[in-house]
Image (cartoon, grey):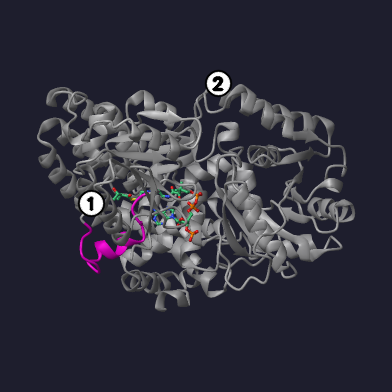
Amino acid sequence: MAPYIRRERRGSVAVVVVDNPPVNALSREVLEQLAAAVEEAAADGLITAVVLTGAGKSFIAGADISMFPRLAAGEMPPVPFQDYMNRIELCPKPVIAAIGGAALGGGLETAMACHYRIASAGAQLGQPEVKLGLIPGAGGTQRLPRLAGVEKAMEMCAFGETVGSQAAAELGLVDRVASGDVVEAAVEFARGAPPVRRTRDMREKLCDAESAESLAEVFRQMARRRMPHQKAPEAAIEAVLAAARGSFEEGLAAEARLFAACLNGEQSRALIHVFFAERAAAKIPGLRAPAQPDEVRRAAVVGAGTMGSGIAMCFADAGIDVWLSDASREGLERGLAGVRRQYEAAVRKGKLSGEEADRRLKRIRSADGMEGVAQADAVVEAVFEDPGVKREVFRMIGAAAPPAALLASNTSTLDIDMIAAATNRPEFVLGLHFFSPAPVMRLVEVVRGRATSDGAIAAAMALAKRLRKIPVAAGNCFGFIGNRMFLPYRTQAVSIAEQGGEPDRIDAALTSWGWAMGPLAVGDLIGHDVWLMIRREALRRGAGHIPVSAFEDELPRLGRLGQKNGFGWYRYDENRRGHPDEELIRLLREYAAARGIEQREWTAEQIRERTLLALVNEGARILDEGMALRAADIDVVFVHGFGFPAWRGGPMHWAEQAGKAKLLERLEALYDEEGPFWKPAAWWRR
Ligand code: T1G
C-alpha cells in the first residue's frame, strides 16, 4: 500500500508520481515509498527508464517542515534523507525528474539525485532551507556544486533564492526546458535511453579547494551583511565547501553534521515557528462565512498619499483594477507620480519588465470624488489620520459604494466602531491596516469592529492573501496589535534615556540583539509630530499605563521632527544617516534635571530587559483581552511589521523560549519597584 505514490506505465518507461497534497512535501513515509517505487521499477524487466514527477502544481516543495520540531526534540527517530536520495541515484536504470512546479529543498535534492532533469517553463528551483534556519540535508550541498558549480551552489544554499528553469538550464542544473507537458517531454527523453549519469560522479564543475575557500570567504562576508546573527548561511557555505575538499561520502558526512547542528539550534525552531504562524494567522476558527468569498474584481482607494498610492499599487500588483481618488487634484497627481516613479525604479532594478510595469500602471485609474467607489467591490480609505475627516469620508463612501462592497479603513490608531458608525452599513466596515511601504511590507492587520460581519472578515482575509499579504486578525483596541505593543516598548526606551541612558547605546542594545532598527531611531523615522498624535490618542483612549508626558513629546516643540527635518534623537546627514547629537543630549539632561529624574548607568542587558518585557507584557494583555487570536499572531505582526528578528521567532515565542517563569519574576520585581506600568498580565501564568 503506497498512498503517496502513483505508478503509471508509458511503454517501457515507468512514471512515478509523488502525490501528497497540497505541495508533495516529503515525510518519512513519502520518502520510503518513493525510493521503493524507483527500486521496484529498476527490478522490472519490462522497464528501461523511470520518470519521477509530482502531482498538482508543485514538483516537491521540500521535506515536510512539520517533522523538524519533533526531530529536534528527539520525539521521532532521525530521517536518513541522504540515504533515500542515494537509493534513487544508485538506480541502475536512467531516472529522469519531470519538474512541473516548485522543486524546493528536498524537492530539488530529489531532482538532483535523479540522473537528468526536465523542467517546465514556470518551474522554480531552490534550496530555501536557510530561511528555516536549516541547510539542505539530503545531499543538496554536494550535488548542487557538481551540477551548477561551487560559486552558484554556495550562493543558492547560503541565501535560499530560487532560480527559474531557464536560468537553471544555463547553469546545467536542468537538462531541458519543456514548452509543453513536462512529463511527456521527460518520457520522450527517457525513450532515448540516456546513459545512467550519477551526479555524485560529476566532478568537472568542482573547483579546487583553494579557490573554493576564497569563494567561501566572499560568501561568508556577504552572509554576515545580508543575514546578520544567523548561523545557517555559514553552515551551508561550509557544507558546499566540503564538496570541493574531499570525496562525495566525506562531503555527505560534513553536510549531515552541519545539518544536525542547525536542526538542533534555536534559530531553526524560531524560523519554523514563524513559517507556520504566518499561515495559521489567516485561519479564523468558527467563522460563519462562505469558504470562498466573492473575488474582488474592482477596488477603490480613497486618499492618494504615500499609504493610499502604495495600497493602490498592491491591488495593481495583484492584477486587480483600482480607482485612486483624493480630496485635491494635485494630491491625486502627486500620488500617481509617486506610483510611476516606483514602477520605473523597479524596471531599472530589473525587478519588473517594462511591459509588466505598464500593465500594472494601467490598472490604477484616477477617479473624481466617489466615482471609483461607486463601482468597487472593495474600498480602502487612506486619508489623513483625523477622526472628523475619516467620519466624513466614510459617510460618503457608505452612500456611494455598491451594496455588498467591503469598506476598509487603513487607520492605524482610530476607533473602527467610530468610523463604522458614520456609514449606513457597519457590518461591512473593518480595518485593513497596511504597513509602510505598502507594496513591500507583507503584514496587514485585519481589524474587527463590533458590528463587522463574519462575511466581511472572511472577504478581507481572502483579499489580503490575494494581495500576497500576511493577514492577522486584530481586535479594535487602541493601536490594534502592533502599535499598541510598540508604544510601551518605545516608552521604555525614552524613559531609559531620561534616566541617563545614551540614545545610541539604547538603540544599539536592541539592534545588536537583532532588531532592524532601534526604538529611538524608529521615532525619528516615523516623525515625532506623528508619534505625539499617537500618544495623545492613546492617552485619550485610555490605552493603559503609558506616562502622561515624556521627553520625546518635547521634540516637535524643539523643532526636532526626526529624519523629515534632519533632527530628532539623532542628527541626520544628507544621506539620512543618523549621528549622535550633543545638542539633543544637552536638552535631554536639562529635561531630566528640571524634573529631578535620577540619572544612572545602563547596561545593554538592562535596556533589553525593560524594553522587551514591556513589549511582551503588552502582548500578554492583548491575549488576555482577546484582541489577538493566538500568541503566534503577535509574533507574525512583529516579524513582518516591526523588524523583530525572525530567527528569534517573534516576541511571544522569544518569551516562551527564554522561560516565562523567569521573565515573570523580573516583571514582578519591576512591578514592585515601579508600579502599574509593569503589572503582569494573566498570560504569564497560563
Ligand atoms: N512542509 C510542510 N508543509 C508545507 C511545506 C513543507 N515543505 N510547504 C508548504 N507547506 C504547506 C503550508 O504550510 C500550507 O499549509 C500549504 O502547504 C500551502 O503552502 C531535507 C531540510 C511551496 C512556494 O522551505 O515556500 O526540504 O496552511 O500557503 O503560497 O534538505 O509553501 O494550507 O495548511 O505557502 O502556494 C524546504 C516551503 C523544506 C518550501 C507554495 N522547503 N514552502 O507557496 O502555498 S526543508 C521550503 C513554500 C527541506 C531538506 C530540507 C511554499 C510554496 P496550509 P503556502 P503557496
Image location (x, y in percent) of residue 227 = 35, 40
Stretch of the chain drawn in magenta: 62-79
- The residue type indicated by label 2 comes to Arg
Residue 412 makes an appearance in the image? no
Q: Residues within 10 Å of mark 1 (few under 14, many from 20)?
A: many
* Mark before the other along the chain sequence, 2 or 1: 1
Front one among 292 and 481? 292
Q: Residues within 10 Å of mark 2 (few under 14, many from 20)?
A: few
Secondary element under disc 2, as helix, strand or loop, is helix
Q: Is 76 colored magenta in this rendering? A: yes
Q: Which mark is residue 348?
A: 2
Q: Which mark is residue 284?
A: none
Q: Is residue 681 above or below residue 536?
A: below
Secondary element under disc 1, as helix, strand or loop, is helix
In the picture, measured across the screen, residue 664 lies left or right of residue 459, that is: left
Image location (x, y in percent) of residue 372 = 83, 42
- The residue type indicated by label 1 comes to Tyr
* Most distant residue in the right direction: 399
Please tell me which residue is depicted at 31% across the width and 69% down the height of the picture: 659
Front one among 671 and 67? 67
Front one among 1 and 367? 1
Image location (x, y in percent) of residue 428 = 77, 62
Please tell me which residue is depicted at 66% across the width and 54% down the height of the picture: 432
Is label 2 or label 1 in front? 1
Instruction: Give the position of the N terminus as an image quadrant.
Output: bottom left
- Residue where numbered disc 1 is placed: 84
Instruction: Give the position of the C terminus as an image quadrant.
Output: bottom left
Q: Is residue 633 above or below residue 566?
A: below
Image location (x, y in percent) of residue 590 = 49, 47
